[in-house]
Amino acid sequence: MEIVILAVVIAVVVVGALVGGLVVGSRGKKRLPPPPPSVPDITAPPAEPHIGEEAETPRDEPRRTIEEVDLPVSGAEPSAPTAVAEPPAPAAPEIEVPEPTAGRLVRLRTRLSRSQNALGKGLLTLLSREHLDEDTWEEIEDTLLTADVGVQPTQELVDRLRERVKVLGTRTPDELRALLREELLQLLVPEFDRSVNTEALEGPGIVMVVGVNGTGKTTTTGKLARVLVADGKNVVLGAADTFRAAAADQLQTWGERVGARTVRGPEGGDPASIAFDSVKEGIEEGADVVLIDTAGRLHTKTGLMDELGKVKRVVEKHAPLDEILLVLDATTGQNGLVQARVFAEVVDITGIVLTKLDGTAKGGIVIAVQRELGVPVKLIGLGEGPDDLAPFEAEAFVDALIGE
Ligand code: GDP
């Protein structure tokens, strides 16, 4: 009897050990891509907590090395040294080489035409109608107004088109395209100097970027730093948008990617003193350009005027500002024009950057805002990618609108 009981107990123990071993073995298989033969060891304790936990880890977890999982049981895994070397070394951040600026608008033109066919193609279709009656001219007007071209420029364009179409008589599609191209180009004032002025008489060129928060101001400052670096300039960034949390971090990250230094201060600190320090730094470093990002709080006009006015005054203790760029979000339409007016009263805007033109069919805002401020659109944002900021070229812009 006792022998029988002993035999049963031994059998239970042996079966138990085998089952436990298989569980460990199968877990071992699950966690290791090529299961080393030594892992399933049935003499090992059935379930050490850490083994169990690690077995739950997905096998394709990117950051977990073989060693972390295997240390307790692995002897000599041949691939081990390679795996140890894999985790990212704490190397200096890699400096990117930004894309050259020439031809960027041509590269990005599909982003424009995709969203703005309504304007160019719509106009061409309307103008191709056999009878250009009053209703058609009204439709042409509506198309222009919908694209945010603005009332006055729309009226001018329609008047010119009417006149020229009459003179033309019969119209071939090519003639119409050429005519529309010429007239749109004229409205864009092709003779504007659209270069960003970074040439100072002495010391670095100083560029201040202003605009309402959310328009893409910091992103634009970062992209512009890349444009300047691509053009061979040495850039210092001033993170004077101390109002928006993380704006300074954001700008610094942009700078680090192209090796530009960022001067920053405490969050909520005095923007003017950061602007002052960044220019000082730029002068001491012998930089070519100092780019200052500012905060765009449109709480009251007086508040904005006080803040930007102070930044400007303080910077100009070093040297005059060479460029004041106003960043406007093209998707905000008339609201953007209101912002433009307010900023223009506060500082002397010398150039406009229109962002998010990739996300709107209202490209006519380029015409309206230039007209409103009397200063050129110098750059346009056509996406969130680092090199999606293009120097504005009137001809390429019109070609993108109406197709070549
Ligand atoms: P800020 O508050 O004015 O400094 O705004 P940010 O620079 O942080 O930009 C606000 C958002 O707009 C971000 O998500 C940017 O990626 C986005 N943005 C900026 N420029 C463009 C652009 O040209 N196209 C698109 N699609 N998004 C943009």
Image (tube, rainbow, N blue to C red):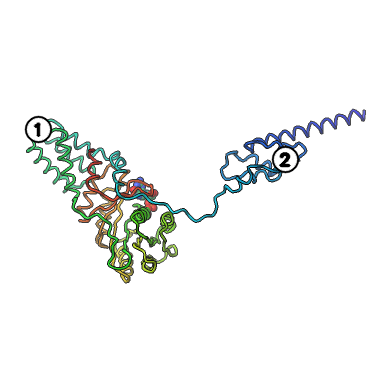
Image quarter (top left, top right, bottom left or bottom right) of the N terminus: top right
Nearest to the observer: residue 6 or residue 82:
82
Say whether residue 16 is left or right of residue 240. right
Instruction: Point out residue 103 in the picture as x, y percentages from the top left corner.
Output: 29, 46
- Residue for badge 1: 170
Label 2 with label 1: CB-CB less than 8 Å: no
**Residue 364: quadrant of the picture:** top left
Q: Is residue 245 visible?
A: no
Mark drawn on residue 47: 2
Other residues around mark 2 within 10 Å, as few (<14) / some (14–19) / many (≥20)? some
**Residue 160: quadrant of the picture:** top left
Task: Inspect the image, locate mark 2, and give the three-letter code of the amino acid beneath it.
Answer: Ala
Up/down of 112 relative to 292, above or below: above
Instruction: Point out residue 167 in the picture as x, y percentages from the top left corner.
Output: 7, 38
Mark 2–mark 1 Cα distance, whole angstroms, equals 89 Å
Nearest to the observer: residue 44 or residue 270:
44
Say whether residue 337 is left or right of residue 58. left
Say whether residue 60 is left or right of residue 155. right
Q: Is residue 19 visible?
A: yes
Tell me which residue sits at (77%, 32%) in the image.
Answer: 18
Instruction: Point out residue 109 in the picture as x, y percentages from the top left corner.
Output: 29, 42
Image quarter (top left, top right, bottom left or bottom right) of the C terminus: top left
Say whether residue 132 is left or right of residue 98. left
**Residue 19: quadrant of the picture:** top right
Task: Inspect the image, locate mark 1, and give the three-letter code of the amino acid beneath it.
Answer: Thr
